[in-house]
Image (cartoon, rainbow, N blue to C red):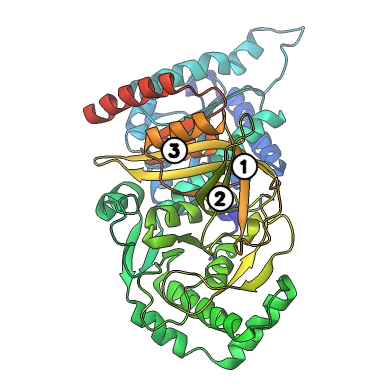
Amino acid sequence: MKKNLKENQFWFVAGSQNMYGPEVLVAVSEHAAEMVEVLNKAPSIPGEVIYKATAKTNEEIKDLIKEANYEDRCTGVIVWMHTFSPSKMWINGLALLQKPYLHLHTQYNRNIPGGIDMDFMNLNQAAHGDREHGFITARLRLPRKIVVGYWQDDAVQEKIGSWMRSAIGASVSRNLKVVRFGDNMRHVAVTEGDKVEAQIKLGWQVNTQAVGALVSEMDAVTDTEIDALMDEYRENYSFATDDTSAVRIQAREEIAIRRVLEREGASAFTNTFEDLTGMKQLPGLASQRLLEQGYGYGGEGDWKVSAMTHIIKEMTQGMPGGTGFMEDYTYDLEPGNEMSLGAHMLEVCPTLAADKPRIEVHPLGIGGKEPPARLVFEGKAGKAILASIIDMGGRLRLIVHDVEAVKPIFEMPDLPVARVMWKATPDLLTGSHAWILCGGAHHAVFSYDATAEMLEDWAEIMDVEFVHIHKDTTIEGLKQQLFLSDIAWKLR
């Protein structure tokens, strides 16, 4: 399912014009090729940067943009004006652009040489050319990322790499299929939404598979296949149960769900404890395992959080922290040290675990099925984000909240689920107020790797409203932001 991130190509285009003569154009090309070579060696650059051209005419630019649009391997376009590149010749091409776009405002040389002359000035005038290009992209209202700074600096490369991950997320989104085993939990509002609009706007194909079809797939799983998967469980997790028969049921479910997803070409799925006809257990360990493998998941039929979980997992591929499905469950309201405890009935991704997860079997208490096996663990400490995408009726809104995960402040030996504890920004009371004010769901994506900037860039690429709750958020300021945003989106 996962694609090597280096299979994502980012076309690097230097802007210039024929006025400068062949010697200058050769230097521009050589400098651009050298910059691309250095970028490809930078650890923060996840995709492959391809030096594509030095664009000098309207026709060259238009043909290049058309090629980028139809080349599946091209995930985004990076442009830089080494010299002056008259912006009218970019109009026809940029009007056709369908790929994420980054404008890199840099220059080949870090410093002005002591012996500067007009030849140097004519060649190295990105300060001039990038302003011209900035005008035409602003005039065209073109969604774009602007990165400013010296191209060899780590901070600049990290900005470029972060945007690349956002562009990868956009590519994943536009090709995403979500399987819903059954429908949403009855009477729940936030898990609903316009699936047609989601496909128009985001590319998501969200369709139902009958639970009975999954049961038939489960019946076809062999004991030999289950035995092999049980060996994998023993290798990766601690067994804190003697009820191996319950664990084997989860293995059967994992194999069957993955087969359906593979057959459908899907990378995310949902289910609900209200629709388990023919199944012995709600998938717990099975869902956690599939999350660990990169699939998206949403409980109670929440297809939006399932899709976003997979997208963010793909965006952050190769990063060390972890990303998973999460639900706000309960608070500790000690004055001045308020915290949130996040968990779910079963399906918290083991990539979030601080230590080796344990397989345990406990009654679920809802759903009317046998006690399911699940992985139990505590989450890691560290900076993280919560992300929720919601349907506002007429538009989608992505809400991102900066949090700080902490080691749980006390033992929870009687809580038989995986959990993460965190401090919200600017504090729990303000942060929760802000989340509710924005309409954030009780389901979210929890990620140690994704950043608000990365997800803001993704939202801009996908034309989705973005709201960020952070250390400087105030309720008064947020109310004003939401009011103005609501007006702006209605006028679009």
Q: Residue furthest right?
A: 114
Residue 76, given in percent of the width and then of the height, sits at: 49, 42
Element carrying mark 1: strand
Label 2 sits on residue: 342
Q: As shown in the figure, which amino acid type bears the numbered disc 1? A: Trp
Q: CA distance from mark 1 to mark 3?
A: 17 Å
Q: Residue at x 63, y 61 (%)?
A: 350
- The residue positioned 61% from the left and 33% from the top of the image is 159
Image quadrant containing the C terminus: top left
Assess whether mark 2 and mark 1 are in contact (beta carbons under 8 angstroms): yes
Q: Residues within 10 Å of mark 1 (few under 14, many from 20)?
A: many
Where is residue 77 shown, x and y percent of the image?
Answer: 49, 39
Nearest to the observer: residue 420 or residue 336: 336
Q: Foreground residue, 62 or 19?
A: 62
Secondary structure of residue under mark 2: strand
Residue at 41% in and 64% down: 270
User: Quick one: 310 or 437, which is closer to the camera?
Assistant: 437
- Above or below — where is 467 with respect to 419? above
Say what amino acid the circle numbered 2 marks.
Answer: Gly
Write the residue at 68% across / 35% down. 34
Residue where numbered disc 3 is placed: 399
- Say which residue label 1 marks: 422
Neighbour class for label 2 at 10 Å: few (<14), some, many (≥20)? many
**How much space separates mark 2 and mark 3, taking CA atoms?**
17 Å
Q: Residues within 10 Å of mark 3 (few under 14, many from 20)?
A: many
Please tell me whether mark 3 sits on a helix, a strand or a loop: strand
195 on left or right of 22: left
Which of the marked residues, 1 or 3, is nearer the chain's N terminus? 3
Q: Residue 88 falls in which quadrant of the image? A: top left
